[in-house]
Image (spheres, helix red, strand yellow):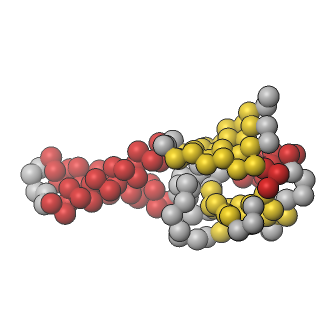
Amino acid sequence: MDRKVYRSRYGTVVIMSVFALAAIEAAVLYHSCTATHIAVAAVFFVLYVLMLRCEYIIEGGTLAVRAYVVLARIDISAIKRIEPSGSFMSAPAMSMRRIRISYGKYDEILISPVRQDEFIKELLKVNPGIEVIALK
């Protein structure tokens, strides 16, 4: 069975978050931190850990979306539409260059695969009926 794995694209927001985490860590090391610094550092640490393993796997007729511990499985034959999205909603996507995948009756997911065109072509091989709205 053919298995294709696509990592998430990493955008500016994520990269800036890593730099912010480094700045907070420096404040902690030099004993100039407050409880707020520690709370912010904890949030950035969680985001960083989630960022380490964000990928999309096409295997057989299934698209698996894995963001560290969260795993969603989508039947590719249920996908109806793929379109660009700049939504700020929380999603298993490490970049703002996202695509919205609509499937089932009302379900959708936002993702940001690298090699986006190749990713979509792989989905179309399984389900050629997917409507692809003009991507950037």
Q: Nearer the viewer, residue 121 or 26?
A: 121
**Residue 75 visible in the current orientation:** yes
Between 13 and 5, which is closer to the camera in this rendering? Answer: 5
- Quarter holding residue 16: bottom left
Residue positioned most to the right: 128
| Residue 19 visible (yes or no) | no
Give percent across and percent down for residue 101: 71, 61
- Marks counted in the figure total 0
Task: Tell which of 54 and 30 is nearer to you.
Answer: 54
Q: Extreme left residue here? A: 31
Residue 134 vs 46, above or below: the answer is below
The residue under the point 79% across, 64% down is 81
7 lies left or right of 62: left
Q: State left or right for residue 42 relative to residue 130.
A: left
**Given the current orientation, which residue lies at the most extreme top position?**
1
Image spot of residue 43 (x, y percent): 32, 56
Query: Relative to 65, is 100 above or below?
Result: below
Establish if 117 lies above or below 90. Answer: above
In the picture, the quarter occupied by the C terminus is bottom right
Residue lying at 86% horizontally and 46% vertically, measured from the top left: 126
- Along the horizontal axis of the image, is 1 left or right of 23? right
At horizontal 23% and vertical 49% (from top left) the residue drawn is 25
Residue 53: give x, y in percent of width and height.
Answer: 51, 41
Give the quarter of the figure containing the N terminus: top right
Q: Where is residue 35 in the image (x, y as percent from the top left)?
A: 15, 60
Query: Farthest residue toward the bottom?
Result: 87
Q: Which residue is drawn at 46% across and 56% down?
A: 14
